[in-house]
Image (tube, rainbow, N blue to C red):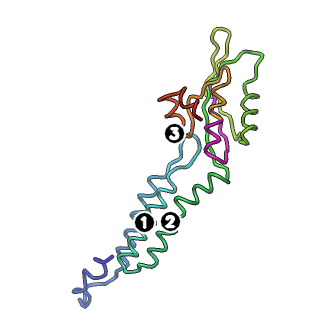
Amino acid sequence: MILSIYGFNGMIDHQNARFDPARLAHGVISGIGFLGAGVIIRRSDRKISGVTTAATLWVVAAIGLCVGSGFYTPAYVATGIVLVNAFFLRAIESKFFYTSGYVSVQISYNERENPFVKINNLLEDYGMIMEEVKILEYTEREKKRLLYIKVFIKHKKRGKIERFVKSLNSLDGFKVIDCSEKKVMFLTEVNDKNFYANL
């Protein structure tokens, strides 16, 4: 913005030159908007990711343009709003409002059992809501049925899904093989017993 405003002062009075400081701002907004759109993706679990990243890229570019133009007060205010939104509102949302997630489970059961009853009971215990169940694979081995499913759930607190995974793994025949909470899955792969013992 400084270059756009002051870099071409010598050409202002030129008869064939058009002086427009807003052209550079227009180019930045369009270019950053294009880059931001590239980070927004739809994942296999039906969740849209990258929206916050794209919005942050765009607003940081806008703050930079404000600073370059000398509008320091709007830049400070916008920076404060962005920080509050990125850190505090996210924590409030995860605590008081439902967020979506998924748990992929390998289930071993016989004909007399209904594994979905146990899953439903656990979800009710933790105040979680089942949105959808997707069957990934079904096989039969040695008179036992192996079922691989992905359960899409809604939950309010991040800690709840960790305790749900712990309880689900403690059931006979149930093994969690994937989870939207990557921290949970990483720790279970590194040190399964110690992680569940300390939850």
Whole-percent x and y of residue 17?
26, 84
Disc 2: which residue: 82
Sooner in the amino-acid sequence: mark 1 or mark 2: 1
Classify residue 4 by image quadrant: bottom left
Category of crowding for the residue at label 3, using alpha-carbon neighbours closer than 10 angstroms: few (below 14), some (14–19), many (at least 20): few
Whole-percent x and y of residue 12?
26, 88
Disc 1: which residue: 60
Whole-percent x and y of residue 165?
62, 33
**144, above or below 152, in the image:** above
Sooner in the amino-acid sequence: mark 3 or mark 1: 1
Residue at position x 30%, y 78% in the image:
2
Numbered range of the magenta stretch: 147-163
Q: Amino acid at mark 2?
A: Val
Q: Secondary structure at mark 3?
A: helix
Q: Secondary structure at mark 1?
A: helix
Where residue 183 is drawn, which disc sits there?
3
Q: Nearer the viewer, mark 1 or mark 2?
A: 2
Residue at position x 53%, y 64% in the image:
84
Q: Label 2 near label 1: C-beta < 8 Å?
A: yes
**110, above or below 94, in the image:** above
Q: Amino acid at mark 1?
A: Val
Foreground pick, 17 / 176: 176
Q: Could you tell me how far apart the alpha carbons at marks 1 and 2 are, in whole angstroms?
A: 9 Å
Q: How many marks?
A: 3
